[in-house]
Image (spheres, grey):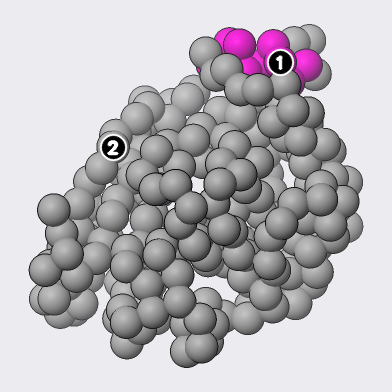
């Protein structure tokens, strides 16, 4: 559809209102991401409709559960979703991105540089960063099943407070697998939000995982 070439029109269709400077940054980000995507596979969301309906909607739901000034690490950031989007819509956050794939980290670094965002980009596995850095929240989207994430991060809960995830309908089965493997004994997993996945009959969720004694 013609209006898919106009980011403002797509935002309006999804009833998303953002300051003009944030819309301009998002538009520049989309173009940089898509340019890089022609050289290295980063995203299948190469229209403004999918950029907004999938990437931005997920990021906006995540940011609702981040307090002002939090130190946030985007795990397996790839092309920068949700980390770069969070930095655009929440400039109060202290964002870091990490990816264990060197070429993806280099792409993220280039995009961050061109957008002039105050983001640190690490070519590293998140669990290695946690050995010498501390964060308030880790965020992860489309990185790995819950059981795998907890296998990575359960030794490092002294280095962060909570893990925020966006997941699709399979999250219930993933939670069951994590429980079966004994990975949730000391942890609470809470569903913070449920929202429709545009263009489908499915729903997405925001999950928070953290130590039971800190769960509210």
Q: Which residue is mark 1?
A: 8
Nearest the viewer among 83 and 158 is 158
Asked if residue 70 lies left or right of residue 171, the reply is right
Secondary structure beneath disc 1?
helix
| Magenta stretch, overall SS | helix
Placement of 195 over or under 147, stated as above or below: above
Nearest the viewer among 37 and 211 is 211
Q: Which residues are magenta?
A: 6-14
Residue 168 in view of the camera: no
Placement of 66 over or under 21, stated as above or below: below
Residue at coordinates 37% horizontally, 56% vertically from top-left? 164
Q: Quadrant of the N terminus?
A: top right
Which quadrant of the figure has residue 90? top right
How far apart are labels 1 and 2 at the CA level?
Answer: 26 Å
Asked if residue 186 lies left or right of residue 178, the reply is left
Q: Which residue is mark 2?
A: 193
Query: Are circles 1 and 2 on residues that touch, CB within 8 Å?
Result: no
Which quadrant of the figure has residue 154? bottom left
Tell me where residue 189 appears, x and y as whole percent. Answer: 20, 58
Residue 10 lies in the magenta-colored region: yes
């Amino acid at each position: 559809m013609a209006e898919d070439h106009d980011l403002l029109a797509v935002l309006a269709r999804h009833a998303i209102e953002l300051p003009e400077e944030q819309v301009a940054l998002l538009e520049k980000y989309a173009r940089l991401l898509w340019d890089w995507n022609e050289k290295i596979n980063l995203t299948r969301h190469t229209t403004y409709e999918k950029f907004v309906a999938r990437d931005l909607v997920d990021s906006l739901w995540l940011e609702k559960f981040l307090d002002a000034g939090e130190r946030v690490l985007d795990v397996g950031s790839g092309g920068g979703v949700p980390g770069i989007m969070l930095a655009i819509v929440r400039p109060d956050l202290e964002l870091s991105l990490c990816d264990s794939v060197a070429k993806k980290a280099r792409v993220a670094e280039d995009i961050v540089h061109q957008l002039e965002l105050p983001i640190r980009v690490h070519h590293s596995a998140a669990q290695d960063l946690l050995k010498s850095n501390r964060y308030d929240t880790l965020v992860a989207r489309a990185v790995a099943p819950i059981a795998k994430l907890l296998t990575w991060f359960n030794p490092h809960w002294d280095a962060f407070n909570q893990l925020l995830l966006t997941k699709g309908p399979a999250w219930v089965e993933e939670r069951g697998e994590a429980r079966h493997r004994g990975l949730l004994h000391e942890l609470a997993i809470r569903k913070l939000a449920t929202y429709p996945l545009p263009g489908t009959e499915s729903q997405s969720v925001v999950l928070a995982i953290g130590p039971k004694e800190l769960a509210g």
